[in-house]
Image (tube, rainbow, N blue to C red):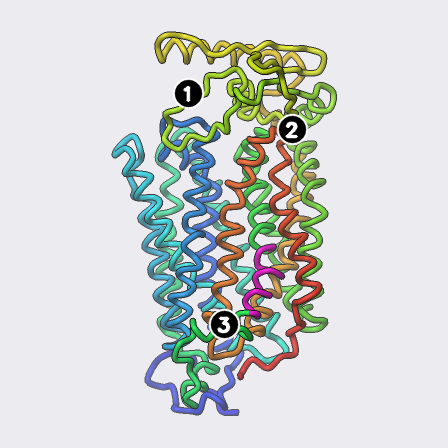
Amino acid sequence: MTKRPLYADGDARKTSAATFEPTPKQLRTVIIASSAGTAFEWYDFFIFGTLSAIIAKNFFAGVSDVTGLILAFLVFGAGFFARPFGALVFGHFGDRIGRKGAFIVTISVMGFCTFVVGLLPTFSQIGVLAPVLLVVLRIFQGFAVGGEYGGAAIYVAEHAPDRKRGYFTSWIQTSAAFGYGGAVAVILVIRFIMGEEAFGAWGWRIPFLSSIILFVASLYIRLRLAESPVFQRIKEEGEIAHAPLLESFFKWENLKIAIIALCSIMIAQGTLWYTAHFYAQVFIERTLQVPAVTVNAVLIAAVAISAPMYIFWGWLSDKIGRKPIMMLGILMGTVLYFPGFHMFTEAGNPALARASASNPVVVVADPATCSVQFDPVGKAEFLSSCDIAKGTLASAGVSYANQQGAAGTLAHVRIGSSDIAVDNASGATVSARAKSRSAIQAKITAALSAAGYPAKADPSRVDFSKLLAVFVVFMIGSTALYGPMAAALVELFPTRIRYSGLSLPYHIGTGWFGGFMPATALAIQVSTGNIYSGLWYPVGTSAFCLIFCLLFFPETYKRDISG
């Protein structure tokens, strides 16, 4: 076959796309260009997820710690909410105009929005306008990301040899590890150099601002690429879809493919991935009170160990098929998350695990006096005895059971054999009520301490190797699902609507089901009192996907994707 350069320069010969075959060097360039942009995408979202607690303090002043963290997660999710809409827009242009142009625009918008987050004034500087601007940037960033992954996966797959698509597209999946590892490493180094106080005040901006380096490098490489040969072929033959969105989602034979992709693998990928990589981190830091620096170090080690697994699973899927490997990944998340999170507690805060077992906590209260304790505007005070009891326990990361009390009675907290009465916070003025509430919280905290519940994890007793082992197992499951996924999605859809058809289910699963996973799980945890109850969300969705995948997902690894 005749070969031609992938670089968009004057040396490219006008050779028919049907006869084009890239050289190994050209294929490496394609992989690097596509993976760099995807790594940039993950870098941004990992930074925001990792710094959620600090962002909550800087942009949501005046609310409780729990509410602020939930709001930060919702802002995190706002970018994910916009992803499917970006998938529709960029999918249309990717199928009509070309793969290259679409994902050059996406990375440009992503780069701008990520950089500007580092320049935003905080709530203390401009008030409520600060979180508004943050939400707007996250929405635009998420909108651009909606066209990023599909373009990168398709571009590589349409260059790759038929029986090596899993291997070559798995390098795009590996970029998630590089983006994640890069984000955590940057944060860890800056935290170490500056100290927690300075980092929390303004140092958190540096990871966002430094993203400009990766953005410029990615854009430079992408601008030098030529169009995908498969797309060029259908363009030469006049087979380009005139209305790719209508053809993708208003023709049953194509809509059915999108539904199968979403319900078989994408919902599971979204919820399982963000449980293992984001919610687990928040759980260990916030609930178990393990120092953030320790958690960051564990994550870097886990990502480094698991990174080659994307390549391995992608390579293996070229040999035995995509479906069994992806089902293995879903199965691992379904059965291992509950025992794994219990192991996190034993390894990260053994004193908490021991106290929970020997002195379980029960809140006895009239349900009519208990509220959800979610206050987006920061005006509610939550002064009932039930709210004070549950709020104090939730902030301390303590699991508790709920027991219905008699109507009109005050709440009381049972800690093992002890029974602590809890009054309502009373007082004529705001300061008096706050003082009364603080006194009640101090009484509950003292009782917890007397029962063996630690205020924070003891760094000397944190089992680093056990934490790392659990993370690695979780990530092996994630890589088994994610490694072959790009090739499987590309192979599912016909060429003329591939960008549109692939991108929408991917970003609904990753964006809507995955992006809102941390906020949903945390809200479930706070409302039930059980620190593990939020896991029912990812475990339940993955169990559904496992059954759906078994019944409906076709094996695709031998398919010809040129038509």
Q: Would you say the magenta stretch is mainly helix, strand or loop?
A: helix
Q: Identity of the amino acid at label 1? A: Glu
Residue in the picture at 35% in, 10% down: 429
Residue in the picture at 55% in, 72% down: 490
Residue at label 2?
349
Please determine whether, in this image, residue 367 is positioned above or below residue 54: above
N-term-proximal mark, 3 vs 1: 3
Number of the front mark, 1 or 2: 1
Magenta residues?
256-268
Separation (CA) of disc 3 from disc 1: 52 Å
Q: Does residue 421 appear in the picture of this structure?
A: yes
Separation (CA) of disc 2 from disc 3: 44 Å
Separation (CA) of disc 1 from disc 2: 31 Å
Q: Find the residue positioned furthest to the left.
A: 126
Number of the front mark, 2 or 3: 3
Residue at label 1?
381
